[in-house]
């Protein structure tokens, strides 16, 4: 997935690259996969790149749209199987572009900084936010707090792609510090991840030839864990089967000595697929709400595109924040 910024028109041009496809085969199917009418209208053109790669050019002006694409591809993958036998979305450029754009947001807004402060010093925090508010970005700073202090952190997420993105965020930010007090290698010694299939256990993290690698961990972390982060928690606790799997993963961290917990969830998704309220661990979480969505019309970053209200939880006011290029 590639993009370029059109400053005059105020949107990004994105390219979704589908391998093993023909032009006639994909055009209508991609529109169906994208879903709502607004997203379908965002498609500018389809064209062939070589013999078997179809490129869909899309204009994106909405952070919610960008996150829906990310969720479709990296989290639920729904509808991709309907694009045709042997058709694959090229995942590597998709992941690389998404993380590079988000990484270009190198400062917390005043609102995000305030909410990061609310997350610090509390043992059990549930950080909730709409798409585009930057909950994972805020969590990144919380994670780096602990890694910088030499403490162990476990990051639990739905799949390997999300774990890779988070590790690469850490690597880029750590390297940007220059001669830092704690070397990158030491940071990563204390950072562990777990993703589906969850039963495969905790993985250690390393960087080899500029690639993120995961290895099985043979170290017992229960007593030494300082922070447990569960990203997109609404997806990991959204039905009974998932809850049982998560209990097997995190149940031991609900017992003393407990690590600090940080749950991240979409504020609009508080119920299971069956319409019941999602049951998170009963640890008396302090709820912290990110209610300000960042936008920036000058900088090339996916995480700060123009945002339109899509989903608000009743009683929580959502505001939009324009971040000046000079301030960033």
Image (cartoon, rainbow, N blue to C red):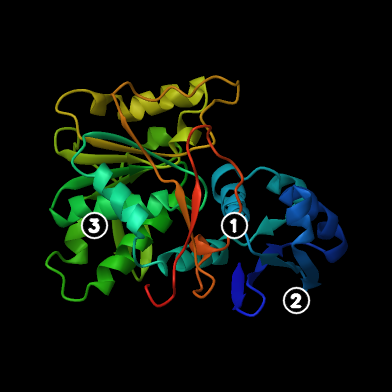
Mark 2 residue crowding within 10 angstroms, few (<14) / some (14–19) / many (20+): few
Q: Give the total number of marks visible in the rendering.
A: 3
The residue identified by callout 1 is 66
Task: Report the quarter where the N terminus lies.
Answer: bottom right
**Residue 126 shows which numbered tag?**
none
Indicate left or right for 226 with 138 as reference: left
Closer-to-camera residue (98/196) = 98
Q: Are marks 1 and 3 in contact (CB under 8 Å)?
A: no
Q: CA distance from mark 1 to mark 3?
A: 29 Å
Residue 103 visible in rendering:
yes
Residue 222 lies, in percent from the top left, at 19, 33
| Quadrant hosting residue 39 | bottom right
Q: Position of residue 50 (x, y in %)?
A: 75, 76
The residue depicted at 49 percent of the width and 37 percent of the height is 267
In this view, the residue farthest toward the right is 24
Relative image position of residue 35 (x, y in whole percent): 74, 47
* Secondary structure found at label 2: loop
First of labels 2, 3 by sequence position: 2
Quadrant holding the C terminus: bottom left
Mark nearer the viewer, 2 or 1: 1
- Local packing at callout 3 (Cα closer than 10 Å; few below 14, some 14-19, many 20+) is many
Q: Which residue is mark 3?
A: 188
Horizontal side of 120 relative to 165 (left or right) equals left
Specify the quadrant of the image occupied by residue 164. Answer: bottom left
Residue, disc 2: 50
- Image position, residue 122 (x, y; %): 21, 37
172 w.r.t. 238: above or below: below
Is any part of residue 84 visible from this angle? no
Q: Earlier in the sequence, mark 2 or mark 1?
A: 2
Quarter assignment of residue 124: top left
**Residue at 28% across, 73% down:** 176
Check disc 3 and report its element: helix, strand or loop.
helix
């Amino acid at each position: 997935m590639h993009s370029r910024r059109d400053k005059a028109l105020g949107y990004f041009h994105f390219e979704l690259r589908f391998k093993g496809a023909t032009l006639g085969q994909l055009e209508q199917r991609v529109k169906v996969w994208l879903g709502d009418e607004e997203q379908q209208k965002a498609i500018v053109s389809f064209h062939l790149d070589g013999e078997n790669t179809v490129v869909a050019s899309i204009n994106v002006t909405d952070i919610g749209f960008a996150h829906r694409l990310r969720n479709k591809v990296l989290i639920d993958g729904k509808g991709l199987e309907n694009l045709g036998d042997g058709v694959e979305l090229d995942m590597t450029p998709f992941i690389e572009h998404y993380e590079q754009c988000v990484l270009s947001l190198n400062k917390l807004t005043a609102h995000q900084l305030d909410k990061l402060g609310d997350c610090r010093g509390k043992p059990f925090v549930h950080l909730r936010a709409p798409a585009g508010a930057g909950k994972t970005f805020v969590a990144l700073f919380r994670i780096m707090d602990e890694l910088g202090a030499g403490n162990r952190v476990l990051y639990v997420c739905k799949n390997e792609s999300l774990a890779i993105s988070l590790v690469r965020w850490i690597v880029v930010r750590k390297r940007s510090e220059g001669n830092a007090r704690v070397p990158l290698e030491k940071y990563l010694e204390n950072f562990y991840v777990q993703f589906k299939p969850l039963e495969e256990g905790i993985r250690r993290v390393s960087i080899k030839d500029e690639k993120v690698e995961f290895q099985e961990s043979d170290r017992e972390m229960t007593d030494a864990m300082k922070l447990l982060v569960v990203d997109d928690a609404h997806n990991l606790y959204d039905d009974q089967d998932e809850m049982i799997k998560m209990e097997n993963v995190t149940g031991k961290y609900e017992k003393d000595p407990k690590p600090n917990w940080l749950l991240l969830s979409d504020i609009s998704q508080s119920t299971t697929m069956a319409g019941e309220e999602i049951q998170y661990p009963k640890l008396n979480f302090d709820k912290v709400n990110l209610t300000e969505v960042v936008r920036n019309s000058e900088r090339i970053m996916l995480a700060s595109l123009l945002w339109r209200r899509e989903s608000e939880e009743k009683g929580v006011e959502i505001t939009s924040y324009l971040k000046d290029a000079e301030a960033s």
